[in-house]
Image: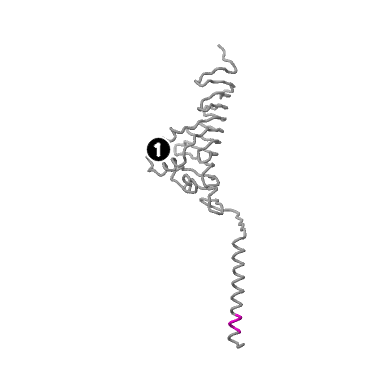
Amino acid sequence: MDRTALAQRLLLIYSGVLTIVLSIVLLTGAASYKKTSFDEIDVKRINVVEPDGTVRLIISDKTHFPGVIVKGKEYPFDRATAGLLFFNDEGTENGGLIFGGKKDKDGKIESSGHLSFDQYEGDQVMVIDAGEEQGQRHSAVEVIDQSDVPINQITDALLLPPPQRQARLEELSSKHKSHKRIYMGRNTDQSAALQLKDGQGRDRIVLKVAADGTPSLQFIDELGNVTSQLPKETR
């Protein structure tokens, strides 16, 4: 075998071995799980997604906060807030944590915090909420009955121009009313209360401690009349 043929054969072998080694490195590298550690990171928005791209969590500042996302598609909706949004297996929003607070040039304070749990393709059915506005503070846990509004009606409304969008959303809200069933919290009048409501959102049992410390327990009928009360009213 002459030198030229031998060199060509060695080059061919070398090329084959190099190709195999490179393929192994690329394949093992792609299959391996990589973990990166940071001491500190500044970020405007983080999207946590499944391997197939389905979004499961978004952490965002106010500027980059998303609109309404249903099955991975985003619809315009300005919430003007920062926080976290959680999504179900189908990439549809099913809860979130939002918060904010500021003092304007006149010293007026606005503050809010809100953690919600949504029903499937629907609005919130349980919330933890706190806020302050015009010097009045409240904080509460609420359980809510939501009607089954077809999700496509909401997404269609979100695609309308802003004036028509708001009108359509209000129309849907009037047709598909939600009702609070349980309220437990501190009211703006500085009272603390537990309110149990019927399917129409009407108070039926109210346990309350007024701002001055006076306790009371009321049983109420569907017309809003107190049928029984402790302590009994004195005449």
Q: Residue at x 59, y 62 (%)?
A: 30
Color scheme of the displayed model: one colour
Q: Is residue 183 above or below residue 157?
A: above
Q: Residue at x 51, y 50 (%)?
A: 45
Q: Looking at this view, is 97 or 125 the one in front? A: 125
Label 1 neighbour load within 10 Å: few <14, some 14-19, many 20+: some
> In the rendered structure, does residue 96 fall within the stretch colored magenta?
no
Q: Looking at this view, is 136 or 4 the one in front? A: 4
Q: Looking at this view, is 216 or 9 the one in front? A: 9
Q: Residue at x 53, y 20 (%)?
A: 221
Q: Residue furthest top?
A: 235
Write down the residue under mark 1. 168
Measured as percent of width and height from the top left, residue 223 is found at 49, 20
Asked which secondary structure carries label 1, the reply is helix
Q: Is residue 22 above or below residue 202?
A: below
- The N terminus appears in which quarter of the rendering? bottom right
Kind of residue at disc 1: Arg
Q: Is residue 99 above or below residue 188?
A: below
- The C terminus appears in which quarter of the rendering? top right
Position of residue 172 in the picture relative to residue 16 (left or right): left
Q: How many marks?
A: 1
Q: Is residue 118 above or below residue 55?
A: above
Measured as percent of width and height from the top left, residue 227 is found at 55, 17
Measured as percent of width and height from the top left, residue 193 is found at 57, 27
Say which quarter of the image contains residue 115. top right
Measured as percent of width and height from the top left, residue 7 is found at 59, 83
Q: Which residues are magenta?
A: 6-10
What main secondary structure does the magenta stretch of the protein show?
helix
